[in-house]
Image (spheres, rainbow, N blue to C red):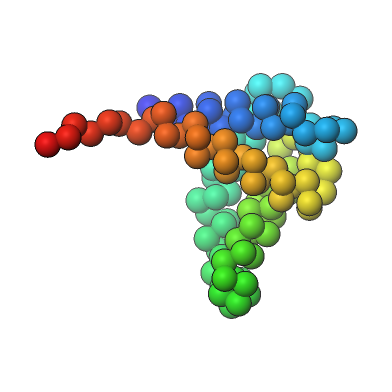
Amino acid sequence: MKTLIRLFLTAIAVLVIAYALPNNWVVVEDFGAALLVALVLGILKVFVKPLLILFTLPITVLTFGLFLFVINAMVILLADYIVEGFDVKGFWVALLFSFILAFLQSILYTFLEEKKPVK
């Protein structure tokens, strides 16, 4: 159940980001496309992102992990290629999109954490 809620929250975040960025940098046709983007991003982050991290490990170590931002942008661009109703205008926009999406997800996902009683 928590996974479905996270998927729904990510879809809402994708719509908000697409609406907030200027000049049609990111275009999402409708909520169904945003939901599909959220699903594809989740799948890509599970299967493709670890492979990209493994293959780019030396450059990631040399840049003290900053190359992971580039990998996130590449995952966004791959989702753009896969999902029909989702369009990102370029690499730098994908990088900005990934920053904002990670920030919004960290805020939204904190509401899903269960409060543990203090002993």
The residue at the far right in this view is: 23
The x and y percentages for residue 113 are 35, 33
Residue ID at (82%, 49%): 90
Residue ID at (53%, 37%): 105
Q: In this rendering, does residue 40 appear at all? A: no
User: Would you say 42 lies left or right of 23 here?
Assistant: left
Relative height, residue 36 to residue 50 (above, below): above
The residue at the far left in this view is: 119
Taking depth in this image into account, of 105 and 31 the one nearest to the observer is: 105
User: Would you say 83 lies left or right of 106 here?
Assistant: right
Taking depth in this image into account, of 50 and 99 the one nearest to the observer is: 99
Residue ID at (64%, 35%): 37
Residue ID at (64%, 41%): 100
Name the image quarter holding residue 54.
bottom right
The x and y percentages for residue 55 are 59, 71
Q: In this rendering, does residue 38 appear at all? A: yes
Numbered label tally: 0
Taking depth in this image into account, of 39 and 56 the one nearest to the observer is: 56
The quadrant in which the C terminus is found is top left
